[in-house]
Amino acid sequence: MVPDRHAEGPLAGLPLLEDLSALDGRRVLVRVDFNVPLAHPDGPDGPARVADDFRIRAALPTLGWLAEHGASVTACSHLGRPKGKVDERFAMAPVRERLGELAPGVALLENLRFDPGEEANDPAFVARLVEGFDCYVNDAFGASHRRHASVVGPPTRLASAAGRLLTREVGVLGGLLVGPDRPFVAVVGGAKVGDKLGVLRSLLRRVDTLVLGGGMGYTFLAASGRDVGRSLLDAEHLDDCRALLAQDGDRILLPSDIVALAPDGTIGDGADGTGEVRIVGPDVPDDWEGVDIGPETAARYSDAVAGARTVFWNGPLGAFEDDRFAAGTATVARAVAGGGAFSVVGGGDSIAALDRLGLADRVSFVSTGGGASLELLEYGDLPGLDALRHAPNAPARGA
């Protein structure tokens, strides 16, 4: 399923770890994606701890390979959104502590986004960042869709390579672009159509069936002439939805029944929500809000997934954090995890749903980058990949 760098697709031309020669004693800067959730188990005034170390563990193959080849390894990452200034809430200390337990000897710089030069791609910040290093490795797939200094700057100055995680992510997702086993079914949720319009168009050029849910489903329903009550509606993109339905409507699945919330209801966490819940559809009554796909829709979507040989899923199909609206996402997630298809899941909310259901280890591949995975599927490339291809040690295309 994973093509090599000589094959067609976004892996083509990338320098790999093996292209970094004579690493013994050399200093290597590794861009990782350690933007992990933090928790305060001892109370809000207590020390922060890493709540989920999935992204740290995902970088261990690269960090370990470099250390085994004699390199002195320093990792760097962003954490949260400190907006270009020091904010102790986003200090890397808890991440550094967990990294030290998992990869002793690997250093970790302070939060890259404490400096405004990171997000501004400031050449002066790049120069400071790479000073004293001999090589650079990008293993931060989840940040490679950003033209940030630590992503696109170092390959202009240092011998560079794609790390094991980045290579794996690009290989798997690139396989969806160039040669998926068919039928190929994509399940896409999320709030606004505008956020995913490009990737929807790209997917419709490749998939056999596109399954839509979440908030964006109501915009498509409205575009098809249905009433959506006070459901989330991306009114600016109704015409775009109509155009997609007119062109490819036979391959787009929309909800046929909906779990709706009464006008005075609220969406909560767990069992905290309030208000009457009713299965309606496909039209939502005035002032009611569609919040999840209904059981008939969940069954239809599950059947589509069950008949696939390749599945891509990004985004929950309802407000699954509220127990009353979790069934649709849970039903489809079980179909994704329980089928025989090669399944790729991306996006934090999708992963959270899998974790909550105990299904994460039953899908073929869990991507560390929701936004990056969507941009790669939309454009076929990412700024971080393009930067690596122009590194001084990058192989010639086709070489």
Image: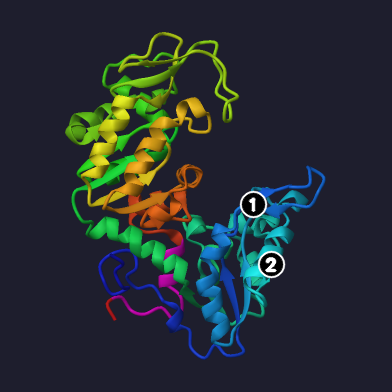
Q: Earlier in the sequence, mark 2 or mark 1?
A: 1
**Residue at (43, 18) in percent of width and height:** 260
**Residue 116 picture location, percent across and down:** 67, 55
Pointer 2 with pointer 1, Cβ within 8 A = no
Is 133 magenta? The answer is: no
Q: CA–CA distance between discs 2 and 1?
A: 20 Å
**Which residue is under mark 2?**
109
Q: Secondary structure at mark 1?
A: loop
Residue 53 lies in quadrant: bottom right
**Which residue is under mark 1?**
51
Of residues 103 and 72, which is closer to you in this image?
103
- Magenta segment boundaries in residue numbering: 384-397
**Residue at (30, 28) in percent of width and height:** 297
Residue 223 lies in quadrant: top left
- Say above or below: 359 vs 262: below
Q: Secondary structure at mark 2?
A: loop
